[in-house]
C-alpha cells in the first residue's frame, strides 16, 4: 500500500499522552506540513500559536475554563467545566490555528482545517499522536478570552478555527470506527 494512503488510513485521535516532549525538529516538520496545505486563492489566512510546556498549557487551560464559565450559552460549558477537563489531554504541545477573516472571510475556516489536517497526518507519519480540539472556537468573542488571545500572539483580525494537541501516545490508538455507508455518490 502507498505510504501516504497508509498514513491516512491508520491515523487516530490520541487522548492520552506521555509527558515527554518531542524535538523542535519534529515540530518544525509538522508545522511545515501545515504550511503546505492548500488554501483558497493561495491566501494562506492562517496564523499559528504553538504552546509548549506544561506550565504554559496549564495557563491556556485556566483561561479556557474561566472564559467558558463566563458564557451562559457556551455549548461546551458542562464538558469544559468538569474537574477532569484539560484543553490538551496532557499532551506537551498545543497548537492554536486562527485565520484572518478580513482577508478571507468565507474560506479562512476551511483553509485552517486543511492546515490542521496536514499537521495531523505529518505527526502520525513521524510517530507523534494528535487530537483535534474544538472548544476554543466558541470563545472568539468572549472579551476576557479575546484579550488573552491577543496577549499570546493571535492577531485581532483572526478567529480561532481549531486547535490540536501533539505528543507521544501513552496507549495504543483505538480501533478504527466503522465507516458510514451510503455517503458517497458518484455521478458519471
Image (cartoon, rainbow, N blue to C red):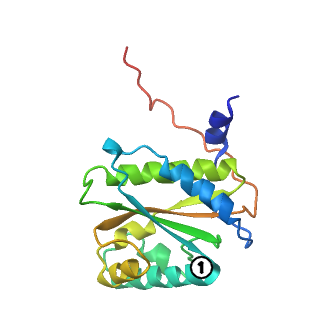
Circle 1 sits on which residue? 84
Q: Nearer the viewer, residue 62 or 20?
A: 20
Quadrant where the N terminus lies?
top right
Q: Is residue 128 visible?
A: yes
Q: Which residue lies at the image location 51% right of the left edge and 32% below the top edge? A: 181
Tell which residue pokes out farthest to the top in this image: 188
Quarter assignment of residue 147: bottom left
Q: Which residue lies at the image location 49% right of the left edge and 47% below the top edge? A: 36
In the image, residue 12 lies at what x, y percent? 63, 50
Quadrant where the C terminus lies?
top left
Q: Which residue lies at the image location 33% right of the left edge and 54% below the top edge? A: 108
In the image, residue 14 lies at what x, y percent? 65, 59
Residue 92, compared with residue 104, is above or below; it is: below
Is label 1 in a helix, a strand or a loop? Answer: loop
Q: Nearer the viewer, residue 129 or 156?
A: 156
Residue 187, compared with residue 112, is above or below; it is: above
Q: Determine crowd level at label 1: few under 14, some 14-19, many 20+ residues with C-alpha closer than 10 A.
A: few
Left or right, 171 with respect to 108, comes to right
In the image, residue 176 lies at what x, y percent? 65, 44
Residue 57, compared with residue 40, is above or below; it is: below
Amino acid at each position: 500500500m502507498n505510504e501516504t494512503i497508509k498514513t491516512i488510513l491508520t491515523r487516530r485521535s490520541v487522548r492520552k499522552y506521555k509527558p515527554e516532549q518531542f524535538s523542535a525538529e519534529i515540530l518544525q516538520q509538522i508545522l511545515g506540513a501545515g504550511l503546505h496545505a492548500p488554501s483558497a486563492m493561495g491566501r494562506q489566512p492562517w496564523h499559528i500559536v504553538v504552546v509548549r510546556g506544561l506550565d504554559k498549557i496549564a495557563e491556556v487551560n485556566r483561561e479556557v475554563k474561566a472564559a467558558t464559565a463566563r458564557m451562559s450559552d457556551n455549548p461546551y460549558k458542562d464538558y469544559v467545566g468538569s474537574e477532569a477537563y484539560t484543553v490538551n489531554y496532557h499532551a506537551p504541545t498545543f497548537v492554536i490555528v486562527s485565520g484572518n477573516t478580513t482577508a478571507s472571510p468565507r474560506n479562512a475556516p476551511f483553509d485552517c482545517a486543511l492546515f490542521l489536517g496536514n499537521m495531523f497526518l505529518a505527526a502520525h507519519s513521524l510517530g507523534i499522536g494528535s487530537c483535534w480540539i474544538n472548544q476554543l472556537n466558541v470563545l472568539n468573542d468572549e472579551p476576557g478570552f479575546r484579550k488573552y488571545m491577543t496577549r499570546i500572539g493571535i492577531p485581532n483580525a483572526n478567529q480561532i478555527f481549531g486547535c490540536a494537541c501533539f505528543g507521544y501516545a501513552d496507549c495504543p490508538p483505538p480501533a478504527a470506527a466503522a465507516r458510514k455507508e451510503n455517503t458517497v455518490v458518484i455521478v458519471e
